[in-house]
Amino acid sequence: MNVFRLAGDMTHLLSIILLLLKIRTMKSCAGISLKTQELYVIVFATRYLDLFTNYVSFYNTVMKLVFLGTSVSIVWYMRYHKVVRQTYNRDEDAFRHFFLVLPCALLALMINHAFTVTEVLWTFSLYLEAVSILPQLVLLQKSRNIDNLTGNYVFLLGSYRALYLLNWIYRFFIEKRQILWITWVSGLIQTALYVDFFYYYIKSWKNHQKLKLPA
């Protein structure tokens, strides 16, 4: 494992810790898109089907369990916790997220590395993850004023994808691994979706102002 892969995993983990910290300590999920969190549950559930059949390493198994377990926990808090669910921005989180699922499923059936159940589902998870952040970004544009924890969560989530791109570049040039085009293209699309948010996040940080996105 290279430093970019490790940094990407730790950044992803830190983003989830920040989100759970907001939910557990503040008893609030204001500014967080339930639609995005539900999409992440689908992403991890379809990607980690090999959890108990294909052992890679202790680290790999633990991280899979953590990402799957925390994503389910976040959705549970937002849907069923008697206090947290009352802070959910239901009216602003109106993105029809399940309209993203069908196109990604059809694309996975048509473009994949091998036409097997596990491979198609793994490919589907890559396509879906690439666009899962859209409901969250739309929600932030509607609410405009973003608290620090939510802003940092989204920034770390985007940073994790950028670090994974560096990981793939490192593996290609240093480890001489072949290019997996489906992984690379979906990762590039996902990172590109964060560019606008990154711009305003860094701008607000430099100016010591509260993060605000344009309508």
Image (tube, rainbow, N blue to C red):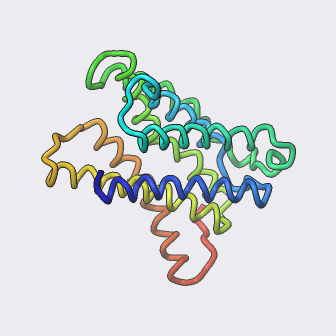
For the image, the number of numbered tags is 0
Q: Is residue 59 above or below residue 162?
A: above
In the picture as drawn, the residue positioned furthest to the front comes out as 58
What residue is at 64 percent from the left and 37 percent from the top?
A: 72
Q: Quadrant of residue 39?
A: top right
Residue that extends furthest to the bottom in the rendered view of this protein: 207
Residue found at x 51% / y 69%: 200
Q: Nearer the viewer, residue 70 or 42?
A: 70
Image position of 46 (left or right of 176)? right
Outermost residue to the right: 82
Corner quadrant of residue 154: bottom right
Q: Is 29 left, or right, of 125 in this rendering?
A: right
Side of 190 where 95 appears, left or right: right
213 vs 162, nearest the viewer: 162
Task: Give the x, y percent position of residue 88.
Answer: 76, 48
- Residue 62, placed above or below residue 106: below
Residue shown at the point (70%, 59%) measured from the top left = 22
Q: Position of residue 151 (x, y in %)?
A: 59, 64
The residue at the point 60 percent across, 61 percent down is 215
Position in image of residue 10 (x %, y %) = 46, 57
Residue 23 position within the rendered picture, expressed as x and y whole percent measured from the top left = 73, 54
Question: In the image, is 17 to the left or to the right of 116?
Answer: right
Residue 197 vs residue 62, the one in the foreground: 62
